[in-house]
Amino acid sequence: MSTLATAVVHYLQEVLGIGTSGVRPWARADELPYFLRDAFEFSELELLGQPVVLAMGRGATKQSLSEVRTWLDKVKTLAGQPVVYVIDALASYDRRRLIEQKVPFIVPGNQLYLPDLGLDLREYFRQRAPATQAALSPSAQAMLITALLRQPWQPDWQPSIVASALGYTPMTLSRAVKELTAAGLATPYTVGRSRWLRMELPPEQVWERAKPALRTPVKRTAWVAGSSVAAPWPSRIAGLSALARHSMLAEPKWPVVAMTAAEWKAATDAGVQELPAPEAGAQEWQVWSYSPSLVEDAMTVDPLSLTLSLQENADDRIQLALDELKGQLPW
């Protein structure tokens, strides 16, 4: 029995206080297409008198939630019984999407949702440890994202060079390095008089580990009259406009751009008019907590910050487009 399967049994016994029949290999797994067997390890157990198939995600395989839902439907059609997605970690917004789509899932030791059996233990969700819940500061977040998106990617990087490019002071640099090392996202070392950071994991794993400590960069959103925008203010295409550039999502009704607080102040001081509500010809301006230009020579904001800015949006079309964007990351 795999470690994940064992964890499922222990978790069910702990939270439900009931016995479960031992986990065993699912006899019909060989009837599935190869890509499903490659994405999941399939087992079976009996819960409340009902045989249940466990589709345990393999850690080395990337799975978008849209794929998971479609694939589990295929397995359920063959099995003729409930099929439960099992994964060792799941972000809160991903959990919400699975619940909205009524996809059964178990995160051992954390979350359980089995609508086919009438079980919904959202009220028992355990809180993350304080160390992983503490949000990184905007400067630390910007430095981390910059390092993750460097091409070609290298695990070792000099935070002073990144901080200088972003216009951060030595004090801000020092605080950001302390945050990144305290969060376990990088290991500090020195070469001569230079301070370096090393990411011990591949970029996609660093990103997944960091996400609970990351926040949307959008501080505020303002509607601006297009007719009052007389100068090409420094900005990047952002929000749904940026997502539409990277996916099949349709362009939004109002163009979206992002800028820093200093750029917003300069624009309003120069006469750019903020509107109380959108109107014909309006633009949506996002004021960010850090530079929306972390990647040079790009028309849109970077894909990681864009994901953070939209991850709480419940619109299924937007979440599917974010899944599409995830597949374009340079990892």
Image (cartoon, rainbow, N blue to C red):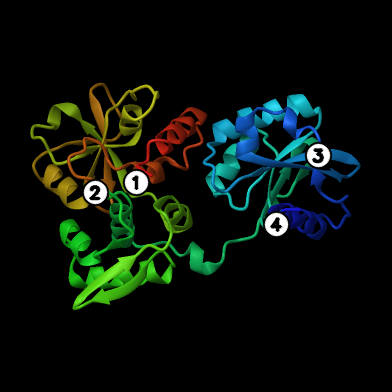
Q: Amino acid at mark 2?
A: Leu
- Pick whichever of labels 3 and 4 is earlier in the sequence: 4
- Pick whichever of labels 1 and 3 is earlier in the sequence: 3
Q: Check disc 4 and report the residue beneath it.
A: 3
Res 305 label? 1
Q: Nearer the viewer, mark 1 or mark 3?
A: 3
Q: Amino acid at mark 3?
A: Val
Residue at left 54%, top 49%?
A: 91
The alpha-carbon separation of the residues under discs 1 and 3 comes to 38 Å
Secondary structure beneath dot 1 equals: helix
The alpha-carbon separation of the residues under discs 2 and 1 comes to 9 Å
Say above or below: 80 vs 239.
above
Residue 211 horizontal/vertical position (percent): 45, 54
Q: Amino acid at mark 4?
A: Thr
Residue at left 43%, top 67%?
A: 183
* CB under 8 Å between discs 1 and 3: no
Q: Residues within 10 Å of mark 4 (few under 14, many from 20)?
A: few
Residue 140 horizontal/vertical position (percent): 32, 62
Res 229 label? none
Residue 185 horizontal/vertical position (percent): 41, 64
Q: Check disc 3 and report the residue beneath it.
A: 52
Direction right: furthest residue: 49
Q: Check disc 2 and report the residue beneath it.
A: 294
On the rendered structure, is 105 left or right of 95? right
Q: Nearer the viewer, mark 4 or mark 1?
A: 4
Residue 120 horizontal/vertical position (percent): 74, 45
